[in-house]
Image: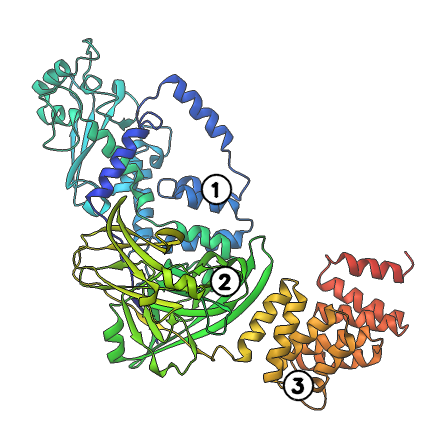
């Protein structure tokens, strides 16, 4: 068996990134002097105070060494912050594994080439650069730049000259993939002729610092440069500019771009990794299996809320992992993608949880066709009105990688005019075979094809799809929808469509040609206009690329039952129950159960509502047939039945039900505690005491059980 990765995304770099970085470094230059350059006294004091404030929390010595020595120059602030929050050695080991995995240039090989090269550079620096210094070699300026950049293409050494201090000029080329110039120098010199070599800064040091016995004007760079040029022309040029061809001799001033270059070099290791994985590691380390925890995979995602034909709301979402790994068995390629979702209130209360599996199976021809394409997972779930956080965890069985979606959403309540957020699709196709069933991004009989990135080409037809609810006939006759496209802050295109010309309401599908849209970032405002006045507005944004075409994803999706199925009543009723809205939950669950009376899950959920409403006999009667005879019920059903019989005072019957649960599913804390209550109800104090003590052995932090046990023992 072999695991193969299909890459779905790429990192984009360009000159614009370098310009922005240089501008940032220029603005920040005063606050962050070059590591090797002397800082003003005030800055030194501030730095000392800052270091004392940032004293690391106590961690084992081997992890402290890893953090402060081995990865000191390449770890990002986010990674360091997360690492210091970890509590156990196991968590630290897993984080370190993830740290190196996210720097592995060829994940398909067993060796991590980046890691091997990094430690080779540390060993070299310690061996050769600490000889003239009390510090280990990795702490010296030469060691730092060697670890970051690796060995130079050439080293020119200038030593044993009476007119200039010992100097080394390191020349690098072929580092453009790091966003650095095609060729550049890094210069080190022995300041005052003694001690270790330190980094030379054209701006902070100037050519004067390289000359022995120079007593001229410290601001007269040109005189120092001319004198240095008579001695060593190559060194003179490098003293004003580290970038060949930019000597700046005409101005007689050091090149500012040289110091910006040095800052850029020191920032390079941190810029070359996306450290989002570190936060995801911390968020999910207690929720995913150990083998997944170090393998976070970034993804794009998009979430939209639409109304179903039955009147309830559906959350549609797509998750698009940056790559998809599959196992190869001969000429078959397969994996399972497991979705674990949670819908919670904004204060953290769980409203609904779900698990789904998306099997992936391909033959060799399909693999060849899809290996260069992105993949998108489409999913949909019903939800009651409210404000929520949707979290979806996706795990790949083949690669043991995981990715996630986190989105705050609002499900609107009833009443008033509702204008949904527009969906921007690159393709819309009639879905005649759907048969009234529900599918993600299936709207008004049309299947929408979209990408979370919302990027289009000039050849695309942009489909704008939304829903408009709550209109009266009178309002419909005089209202229209205005579509406004903004390029930057300027209106680029506008169109008003009367509602009387939209026969598909409440669904709206408008197609726009993008052939006359220049590449740019756009905003689209869709407004309901009544008598020329804006009533409701919703917005979306998109990008138009200069490319002629884009790779569109192949899609994993599932078909759900029609909107009138009890399937949705069960989910919506469960959500209302968890929100404490028992009356609404009861109504929806009773209606759903009337359509499917033999559904055990529906019956159990409704019985839980009856228990909360203290209708214990109704709860017991509803699920008694599921626990009768030889049929095996779920653990949850046995527990609900046991609670119902306990509250009815039928303690022995409750114990018999709980015994069956243990025989079928084993014991747990909830069962043990309910056993104790039932034994106590029968006056069997010794039995009650025994099961509660067992419960506390398994989970000591149970204050209520401790109180019961103390009361039973008369303490």
Please rate how many residues cluster around mark 1, counting C-alpha atoms within 10 Å: few if below 14, some from 14 to 19, many from 20.
some
Task: Give the residue drawn at x 46%, y 56%.
Answer: 407
Between 284 and 199, the residue placed more toward the observer is 284
Q: Earlier in the sequence, mark 1 or mark 2?
A: 1
Is residue 336 visible in this depiction of the protein?
Answer: yes
Point out the frontmost of discs 3 and 1: 3
Please rate how many residues cluster around mark 3, counting C-alpha atoms within 10 Å: few if below 14, some from 14 to 19, many from 20.
some
Measured Cα–Cα span from mark 2 to mark 3: 33 Å
- Residue under pointer 2: 290
CB-based contact (under 8 Å), mark 2 and mark 3: no
User: Residue 572: horizontal and vertical position, in percent?
Assistant: 57, 70
Between 76 and 497, the residue placed more toward the observer is 497
Secondary element under disc 2, as helix, strand or loop, is: helix
Judge left or right: residue 428 versus residue 152.
Answer: right
Q: What numbered label is drawn on residue 64?
A: 1
Secondary element under disc 1, as helix, strand or loop, is: helix
User: Residue 596: horizontal and vertical position, in percent?
Assistant: 59, 84
Q: Earlier in the sequence, mark 3 or mark 1?
A: 1
- Residue under pointer 3: 632
Q: Earlier in the sequence, mark 2 or mark 3?
A: 2
Measured Cα–Cα span from mark 3 to mark 1: 54 Å
User: Residue 275: horizontal and vertical position, in percent?
Assistant: 38, 49
Q: Quadrant of residue 74?
A: top left
Task: Give the residue drawn at x 7%, y 18%.
Answer: 230
Q: Is residue 695 above or below residue 41?
A: below
Point out the frontmost of discs 1 and 2: 2
């Amino acid at each position: 068996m072999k695991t193969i990765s299909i890459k779905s995304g790429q990192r984009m770099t360009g000159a614009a990134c370098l310009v922005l970085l240089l501008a940032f470094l220029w603005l920040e230059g005063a606050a962050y002097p070059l590591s090797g350059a002397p800082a003003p006294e005030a800055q030194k004091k501030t730095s000392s105070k800052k270091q004392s404030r940032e004293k690391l929390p106590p961690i084992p010595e081997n992890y402290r060494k890893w953090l402060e020595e081995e990865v000191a120059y390449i770890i990002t602030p986010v990674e360091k912050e997360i690492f210091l929050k970890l509590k156990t050695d196991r968590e630290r080991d897993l984080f370190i594994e993830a740290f190196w995995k996210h720097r592995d240039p060829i994940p398909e090989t067993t060796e991590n080439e980046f890691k091997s090269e990094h430690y080779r550079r540390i060993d070299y620096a310690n061996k050769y650069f600490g000889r003239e210094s009390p510090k280990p070699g990795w702490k010296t300026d030469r060691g730092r730049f060697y670890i970051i950049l690796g060995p130079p293409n050439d080293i020119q050494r200038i030593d044993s000259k009476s007119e200039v201090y010992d100097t080394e000029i390191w020349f690098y080329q072929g580092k453009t993939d790091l966003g650095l110039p095609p060729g550049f120098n890094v210069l080190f010199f022995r300041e005052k002729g003694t001690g270790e070599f330190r980094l030379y800064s054209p701006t902070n040091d100037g050519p004067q610092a390289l000359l022995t016995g120079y007593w001229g004007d410290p601001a007269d760079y040109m005189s120092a440069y001319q004198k240095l040029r008579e001695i060593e022309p190559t060194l003179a040029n490098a003293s004003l500019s580290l970038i060949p061809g930019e000597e700046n001799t005409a101005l007689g001033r050091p090149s500012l771009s040289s110091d910006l270059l040095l800052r850029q070099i020191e920032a390079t290791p941190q810029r070359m990794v996306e450290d989002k994985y570190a936060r995801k590691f911390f968020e999910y380390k207690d929720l995913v299996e150990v083998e997944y925890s170090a393998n976070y995979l970034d993804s794009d995602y998009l979430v939209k809320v639409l109304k179903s034909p039955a009147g309830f709301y559906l959350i549609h979402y797509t998750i698009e992992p940056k790559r998809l790994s599959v196992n190869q068995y001969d000429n078959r390629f397969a994996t399972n993608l497991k979705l674990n979702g949670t819908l919670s209130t904004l204060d953290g209360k769980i409203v609904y949880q779900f698990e789904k599996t998306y099997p992936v199976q391909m033959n060799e021809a399909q693999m060849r066709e899809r290996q260069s394409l992105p993949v998108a997972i489409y999913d949909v779930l019903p939800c009651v009105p409210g404000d929520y956080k949707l979290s979806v965890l996706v795990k790949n069985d083949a690669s043991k990688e995981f990715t996630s979606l986190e989105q705050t959403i609002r499900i609107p309540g009833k009443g008033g005019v509702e204008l949904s957020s527009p969906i921007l699709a690159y393709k819309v196709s009639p879905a005649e075979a759907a048969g009234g069933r529900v599918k993600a991004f299936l709207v008004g009989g049309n299947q929408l094809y979209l990408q979370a990135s919302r990027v289009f080409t000039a050849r695309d037809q942009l489909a704008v799809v939304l829903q408009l609810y709550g209109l009266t006939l009178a309002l419909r006759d005089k209202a229209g929808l205005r579509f406004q496209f903004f390029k930057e802050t300027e209106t680029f295109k506008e169109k008003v469509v009367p509602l009387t010309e939209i026969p598909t309401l409440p669904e709206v599908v408008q197609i726009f040609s993008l052939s006359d849209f220049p590449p740019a970032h756009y905003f689209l405002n869709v407004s309901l206009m009544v008598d020329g006045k804006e009533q409701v507005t919703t917005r979306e944004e998109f990008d138009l690329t200069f490319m002629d075409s884009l790779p569109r994803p192949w899609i994993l999706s599932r078909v759900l039952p029609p909107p009138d199925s009890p399937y949705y009543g069960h989910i919506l009723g469960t959500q209302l129950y968890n929100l404490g809205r028992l009356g609404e939950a009861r109504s929806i669950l009773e209606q759903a159960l009337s359509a499917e009376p033999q559904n055990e899950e529906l019956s159990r959920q409704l019985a839980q509502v009856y228990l909360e409403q203290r209708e214990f006999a109704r709860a017991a009667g509803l699920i008694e047939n599921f626990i009768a005879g030889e049929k095996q019920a779920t653990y949850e059903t046995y527990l609900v039945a046991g609670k119902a019989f306990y509250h009815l005072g039928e303690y022995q019957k409750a114990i018999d039900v709980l015994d069956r649960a243990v025989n079928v599913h084993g014991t747990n804390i909830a069962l043990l505690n309910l056993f104790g209550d039932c034994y106590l109800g029968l006056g069997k104090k010794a039995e009650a005491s025994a099961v509660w003590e067992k419960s506390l052995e398994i989970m000591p932090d149970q204050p209520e059980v401790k109180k019961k046990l103390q009361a039973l023992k008369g303490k």
